[in-house]
Image: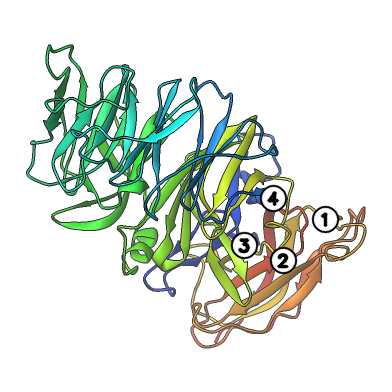
Amino acid sequence: MKTPILGGAYVARSVNAADNRMVNLFPEVIPDGGKEPAWLQRAPGLDFIQTIGSGPIRALWALSNRACFFVVSGSEVYKLTTSTGLPVLIGNVSGFGPVSIADNGTQVFFACNPDGYIYNATTDVFAQITDVDYPGAITVGFLDGFFVFNEPDSQRWWKTELLDGTSVDPLDFASAEGNPDGLVALCVNHREAWLFGTDTTEVWYNAGQADFPFARIQGAFNEVGCIAPYSVAKMDNGIFWLGGDPRGQGIVYRATGYQSQRISTHAVEWQIQQYTDLSDATAYTYQQDGHSFYVLNFPSAFTTWVYDIATSLWHERCSWDNPGFNRHRSDCQCNFGGEIIVGDYENGNIYTFSLTTYADNGGIQKWLRSWRALPPGRNTLKRTAHHELQLDCQVGVGLVTGQGSDPQAMLRWSDDGGHTWSNEHWATMGAIGATATRVNWHRLGMTLKTRDRIYEVSGTDPVKIAIMGAELHISQTNA
């Protein structure tokens, strides 16, 4: 019998209902001609590039022409022309939290809530915005020649002078007044400014008006707001964010047209709504091998959730701090030189994401998958004897020497719906070249208590993981 190991993460409010955990693995659908309709592959590892400043890495940004990229490390801003090149300190910024960045091809605007800074790539000058009319900025974008940003603790959003982020006219602002909620964040997408309030969202465009050129798009008003300004991120021709409104919060949305589409599941929402602080959530997006990922970090909860547009499924992305999982080390991202570069939330390290690296900065990257032994609707609540479980996976993946030369898969099970677990039972995944290895476990006992078994398989060896399925041999009693 095929046991349903494939799928996404779904741990319900009651683990007796669903306990499908997925950590550092994500599924890929096989359209046709595959052994199974999908398979699970290992999340990318972290390849260390270099340490820049004392950290943490608060932002990464590649200039529009990709000639260089910028790293905000702690209070310092560095410029690099190659990812491995010598970082050049260009200036200092204020604050401690995330930094929002935009550029117009020549100037780079750093919004540090509230202070703002401009780097001019032509003159190589970095300076704080000192215009007396600059009101401060939380998030910044670039739209039709103007930098646009939202003012802290207000409903106002502003534009700078044309192609000049250092100059602000005292009348160049408008208010998002579709609802009296305060503005949280601004995001420019398809030459339109999305203004996220605490309870609502509205969209403006360049109407070419004489004074303030932008106007609200009629009908582009959404009664869903945003509760974390740095959770807003663009991907796949849309915008993603952690939402809230007067009726509640903790749902992840995607913009579909001018409407909000819920993409989080009840299980993910239950997890999110347990966290004590949602306002500090941060997000970034990236694309790799055709998968587009929205990575949502919850710093105060030490948790990272990832949504894959290719499958519309969620999984957890974690670092391993023995004896448990922690949030993923990456907190921001940029695409530069054909590499996905990410920055560490705790120190000054920058890394690349690699699907052929099976460790995080040389340390353990633990993967884990838990699932119900029987497919939905197959549990008759009778006792079953579990004779053998075989993992259908790529084998013979061992390394030449060291950890991973005899890679192991570790199996546990729970017979009370996921509340308590057995000891680990190890099975080899095959030394290098041992491509006929069978990854299986025998004599797995009889289900007791709830007559409901959950399996969990995991591993820590730095080897390739590709899981196509699992086969379970059981017999049922009349008890």
Element marked by disc 3: loop
Q: Label 2 is placed on what type of residue?
A: Thr
Mark 3 or 1, nearer chain start:
3
Q: Residues within 10 Å of mark 1 (few under 14, many from 20)?
A: many
Are dots 2 and 3 in contact, CB under 8 Å?
Answer: no
Closer to the eye: label 2 or 1: 2
Q: Which mark is residue 395?
A: 1
Element marked by disc 2: loop
Q: Which residue position is annotated with label 4?
A: 48
Quadrant for residue 195, please give it: top left
Mark 2 or 1, nearer chain start:
1
Q: CA distance from mark 3 to mark 1?
A: 19 Å
Identify which residue, 288 or 477, lies in the foreground.
288
Q: Position of residue 62 (x, y in %)?
A: 52, 31
Mark 2 or 4, nearer chain start:
4
Q: Is residue 473 left or right of residue 324?
A: right
Q: Which mark is residue 460?
A: 2
Identify which residue, 235 or 7, lies in the foreground.
235
